[in-house]
Image (tube, coloured by chain):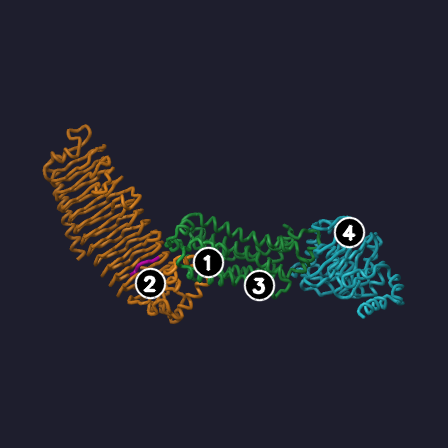
Amino acid sequence: MVSIQNLHKKFGKNIVLSGVNLDIKEGGIFAVLGPNGSGKTTMIKSILGMVIPNQGTITVLGKNIKKSCNYRNQIDYLPQIANFPSNLKVNELITMIKDLRGKSTNEESLIKMFKLEPFLDKKLGNLSGGTKQKVNIVLAFMFDCPLIILDEPTSGLDPIALIRLKDLIQAEKVKGKTILITSHIMSFVEEISDEIVFLLEGEIYFKGTINELKTKTNQPDFERAIASILTENHA
Amino acid sequence: MQFSVTHRFIIYSLLTILTGYTQTILAQPIIVCKDCQTTSLKKAIALAKDYDTILVKKGTYKEYKIEINKPLTIIGENYPVIDGELKGEIITIVSDHVVVDGLFIINVGTSYTEDFAAIRVKRSKDFEIKNLVLEKLFFGIYLEKAANGKVYHNKVIGDAITEHNSGNAIQLWYCKNIIIENNIVQHARDGIYLEFSDNCIIKNNISTNNLRYGLHFMFSNNDTYENNVFSNNGAGVAVMFSKKIKMFSNTFRNNWGTASYGLLLKEINDAEIKGNIFEENTIGINIEGSNRIDYVKNNFINNGWAIKVRGACYTNKFIGNNFLYNSFDISYNSNINDNVFDKNYWSNYTGYDLDKNGIGDVPYRPVKLFSYIVNRTPETIILLRSLFIDIIDFSEKVSPVFTPDNLLDNNPLIKKIVW
Amino acid sequence: MLKILKYSFFDLIRSRWSYIYFAFYLTLGVVLLFLNNDLSKAVITLMNVIIVLVPLIGTIFGVMYYYNSKEFTELLLAQPLKRTTIFLGQYLGVAISLSMSLVLGLGIPFIFYGLFKSNAIWDFSLLLITGVFLTFIFSALAFNMALSNENKIKGFGYSILVWLFLAIIYDGIFLMSLILFEDYPLDKLSLIGTMLNPIDLSRTLILLKLDISALLGYTGAVFKQFFGTHFGLIVSITMLTIWVILPVFRIIYKSAKKDF
């Protein structure tokens, strides 16, 4: 599905990714974890072509993404911070994204699911953070793409919406899609992910299932396993 | 003064007309045509007695060096053509009381040694030259030591290309009491040129596209020109080394170029400049060494410089003029001022009138620092209307250093003056 | 690109600032014409405004829009769209909506005043054309500055500096160097100096209309050819076009390399 070879990226003098190699197979939920500044978002943005790598190649669905934009038709993306043009109304934004991608969508069921009907005629600038995030989710799941990338999808969501989101992710997984998630909420990651990728100081420190991680670190639960990696490396 | 001159002219003109008229009644006119007994103007003149009338019928007459040596009235019917074939001067009047009317004179010869003219009046009085059309000329109408004459309703079209081998459309040399009225002069060196000629009146003429000046005075005094239009000339009017010239209600327009002015005053004293329009000239009036001149009720519109003062000019008065949208209103090349500016309207004035008396409460300073800079380094003109220039102009306005600090209009008007 | 342009444009058209900008020009036009009642004077005042304010507003608007729509840009970047499409679309959205505010804001009062019956229409059209050029140039410069500076304050500061330099400081240096080298033939130098600054270029274009009589007072042959014929007009318009194209190319170049 996604294959990254020898990915290097630095911002100024700050080296963020130094030689990441990653192969993500089709189907399943992959969580990208790592401490702050470990390069999670940079890696995801590299896959999306928003960050231009200094070195390395990325292929999505078998094609090199360099200087190409059409492959993004196959990706649904949920950005980390949901800020939209404040003068647009919610339904205008949805229409616009539909217009730009030109694909049939299932936005109505999503709007119903997140109870956004009352907000459709409101300007995006007047929405609360949580509501904006819901709109963000609708936009991300609207299209039926084989690859879904979610950057901190849980931020600002109330518990009901969180449950709905989990259901949604599971449903997409059942359809055989590949889902890439970054999150700080360990319980959320533990609950839904099939496999995790742990980034540390610009490199992949671990890739495998949660059980494999527990075994490797000799910790009984997931959170401690993560903590032990961090303390070991910082010690 | 002016009245008496006019008066005298009217009497002379009437006399001329009357004498001519009585002659036509008394004697049969001599008719010139291709199939007549007399087939040339020269022959007709030779045949004629004093105060006879010669009638020239339509046709082309190839003649030059025609001398009118007795009082005669020569009338062209339907504009007969007198073709000089570029051989020299065509008509020379050496007698008093001559009237020439309605001829089409072409092809005057060009010479570098002699000033050939289409028609010349030499040491004669009481003449009248009217309704002539002159083309392909060197000089057009040349009045030499003539007096009490009238040049009326003629059209003089030259084909001057360079100054040194072209002549003037109407030239006066040592003349007195001449009226030049309703003429159209164009494409000559000077439209109308007066040298050592006094008490002349020049009015209602249209002088355009002349190489040098539309109207040119040299060493001539007590002359008046009014209601003339001067446009697209090398320079509109040049008044030099003359005294007591009256300039009323003329229009000076579109005189563009490096040394181009609407009006050039050089060594002029005691003149009156009133009710004229100066529009779209590079320089409206260029003044050098001229004193005691009153500039009243003139309109200066869209000129590069409305008034450019060079050299010493004293006790001139600028009162009640409109200065509208000129790139520069006044330019001085020194910071000494002895001239008065009062009650003018300046479109560039930005002051206010709190007491509503129609007069701005802050004096106007018509000389800008930038005009001083442009005088020094002409290329800087390219920065005209730049914000930076506005800023330095403003600082100079607040505390004048380079421009005369007493050059102020203390009573700038708030509204454009309408007469 | 047209889709992005459309959305940026409508987004801006509905923003408060477009209205303020539009209202400003409308008021200016009305005040100049109906309180002053003098078309020629109005055109001259307008020229001063257009040469100084239009670039400033283009700059501020360009920078503001770029930084404010950063998230929107990121949203668009994740869509199957080319970067050129996104940034040119946004740039054109800003430039066109600003130009519209300018043209309508000034045009409406002038039309009511009876512009079509006046011969000032050419001067006025030239003013508007110049204004539109300046809007395009300075919003492009602002986009450049914003693209090169992640830091909002820095980007804003540099853009204002660019404006300040081109609007005032440049002319100061220009004037000083002309005076300093006044013993040398300067006409070519002064024309080249003008070409290198879009504000000076627009000013010259308007001078050709308003102050041609003064400009022709200068002796230089190059000057004469430039100002006396259509040559000046053609060269100025060409240079203005180049001034639009160059920053736009840099937008394309910079945006292709930038990380978001």
- Label 4 lies in what chain? A
Please, what secondary structure does the residue beneath circle 4 have?
A: loop
Relative height, residue C211 to residue B120 (above, below): below
According to the picture, the residue beneath numbered tag 2 turns out to be B333
According to the picture, the residue beneath numbered tag 1 turns out to be C47
Tell me if C115 is positioned left or right of A57 in this view: left
Please, what secondary structure does the residue beneath circle 1 have?
A: helix
* Residues tagged 4 and 1 counted as in contact (Cβ below 8 A): no
- Whole-Å distance between the Cαs marked 2 and 1? 29 Å
| For discs 3 and 4, the disc positioned in front in the rendered view | 3
Badge 3 or badge 1: first in the primary sequence: 1
B100 falls in the magenta region: no
Which residue type carries mark 4?
Cys
According to the picture, the residue beneath numbered tag 4 turns out to be A145
- Whole-Å distance between the Cαs marked 4 and 1? 55 Å
Residue C114 in view:
no
Residues marked 4 and 2, same chain: no
- Quadrant of the image occupied by residue B51: top left
- Residue B299 coordinates in the image, percent (x, y): 33, 58
Disc assigned to residue C158: 3
Q: Nearer the viewer, residue B69 or C145?
A: C145
The C terminus of chain A: image quadrant: bottom right
